[in-house]
Image (cartoon, helix red, strand yellow):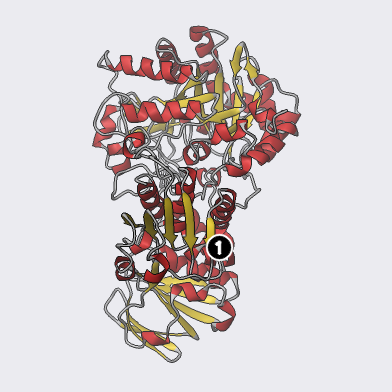
Amino acid sequence: MSKYKHILSPVKVGNMVLKSRLVSANSLPHFLQGPETYPTEQIMHHLTSIAKNGAAIVTFADWTNMAQRESFNEDGRRFPMYDLSDPSVENYICQLAETVHYYDSRLSLAIMPFAAPDPIYDVCETEAVVFNLNNKNFRDGQDDYDVGMMLRGGKAAKQLNHEQIAEIVEYYAQRARYYQTMGFDMVTIHCAYRATLFARFISAKTNKRTDEYGGCIENRARMILELCARIKELCGKDFPIELQITGSETDGTTIEETIEFAKIAEGLVDIFQFRAQTPNLNHPVGYNSTDDDYATLADCAAVKASGTKILCEPIGGYQDPDDMERILASGQADLIGAARAFIVDPDFYKKLIEDRGEDVLPCVRCNKCHVPSLDGKWISICTVNPAMGIAHKIEKYLEPVSGVKKVAVAGGGPAGMRAALMCAERGHNVTLFEKSDALGGQLRIMDHASFKWPLVKYREFLKAQLKKAGVDIRLNCEVTAETLDGQGYDAVILALGATPKKPNIPGVEKAWDILSVFGNEAKLGKNVVVIGGSESGVEAAMYLCENGHNATVLTRQSSLAPEATPIHYREIMQEAYCALNGFDAVLEATTTEIGDGYVKYIDCDGNEQTIACDSVVALGGMEAHQDEAIALHGFAARTFMIGDCRQVGCIRDCNRTALAASGQI
């Protein structure tokens, strides 16, 4: 009997059989293709790989608003868009459906009627909304329509009238029918976070109407249920409908109302996908979640326990196979929704089938797969899956293994560990040298900060996998020329890392460097100044505040951690440091002097200021160990420099260079 029998067991949605209990939500990385107005090989490969990787449902969004190319938003300007005015584009969409079906998965159309020309993610009662439908705005002169909200400044917004509601319902029902003709099996409608028009109707927090579309939950749900009824009429009763909903809200829709909603929706809605009440909570990272904390599970379990016939599916941070199995076995859910899980490990399903859940690569919850940057580079990435973004052609890059090679890896940080593991997985004999008494490199300090637990989990995973793969690990062994000379190595991989630099500030010798702070917080005084507002500097200050210090960040930037992942992650980080006692920051500040008990800086107005403090932490970047690595060349036929010793970067760079090196051996 399979260890993951519940995850792997089929389930019926009406008369449709799903091959497993895994659902892949709408999660297309934004920069997989260029200006093509049809699903390219990159898109098809990505979605088909998700089907191959176990998802019984693969969700595909109706990205067909070509006007988005003119958006002021850099993300939107580059997002894949499909020109359905060209009939031949339908050919590729049909091919996409065929490839997903090849792996016995179902393809769902994601309908996301955002209540604005550009999506609003942080919705509140005072925001103005323009509803945009197929490049047509519902307007009356200059007045904006909504479900009965208030415009900024307190001006009442006009309500959509019954004719407009009927037109919206018909439009999206026809979209569902259109995609059904191209092979789509079902539809997923976004009704969560109060972010879409339907979500704003359902939420008691935003729907203030007094007619039959407002008031009780039956009325607030009327529009979405009218849409569901029309879709069933056009597409047939065996065309499943999944709703993405928020089960309960603070000062809004209650779980009791959602249970009532489930009762009246039976027969029209087939699956409830439970999302948290905000996008940030539903995309958990280290700052707002713990390893076994699932924000959506309680609502899902409550509705499931009500006896509803609608299948219940939580989503948001689900990746651990043992947790998934436990949740399904306990009857708290019928399905498990995920996105990052299918991106992180391309062998996720294979490992479940083989009862190897412990071998599933853990997500570090960086959210870089969503959008890594809004000012370039314009590439889709995953921190721990280095093939992400080039997966459709990675086989062309990997050299075939011509025989077992003897490989030395110098450095037991994230780059060295991953390179050693990849070489071992390719069948080589690998020796990993680490000059300290433990593996991990810079990941070793992650133990000390509570919010870095995803990276601790990743580090421990690598250590366990290295042992399982039979890599010869030699601690307290610094690699020198004598270590390598005459040992018969076919390849040497140098992952020597980098060390912190201090900025060029008078008195900087009095300051702590970034890596020395973690684990030594008791040696620092009560009041600390952190010079440098990068993500690392902010996290150092957060760590100190967690341990009872007052920390003030001085930065020349106009914002804190500007390089942090821009979608969800940066906002969540801000929420976390704003909630800490003792955390403060001074922006657009140029530090001029570090003295005994003080730091001087020039503020944004050009005035000199002084902060009294007990300790100072100064960040000046990292210095790559390039010269040390260069000195170790020449002891094997192939020598590679990877990770920070090649060029200071991030964990993603460590993993990509590790893949590139191991793939050539």
Q: Amino acid at mark 1?
A: Ala
Q: Which residue appears farthest toward the bottom when viewing the image?
A: 596
Q: Which residue is mark 1?
A: 579
Which residue appears at 50% of the width and 31% of the height?
25
Tell me if I can see residue 198 in this picture: no
- Which quarter of the picture shows residue 82? top left
Element class at badge 1: loop
Does 268 sit above or below residue 642? above
- Which quarter of the picture shows residue 295? top right
Tell me if I can see residue 229 in this picture: yes
Considering depth in this image, is 332 or 553 the residue closer to the camera?
332
- Which quarter of the picture shows residue 321? top right
Considering depth in this image, is 530 or 351 the residue closer to the camera?
351
Does 445 sit above or below residue 167? below
Question: Measured from the top left, where is residue 421 in percent x and y?
Answer: 49, 50
Which residue appears at 48% of the width and 41% of the height?
344
Image mark count? 1
Question: Measured from the top left, where is residue 69 in percent x and y?
Answer: 25, 34
Question: Measured from the top left, where is residue 432 in percent x and y?
Answer: 48, 59
Viewed as shown, does residue 550 lie left or right of 392?
Answer: right
Which residue appears at 34% of the width and 69% of the height?
625
Considering depth in this image, is 546 or 395 the residue closer to the camera?
395
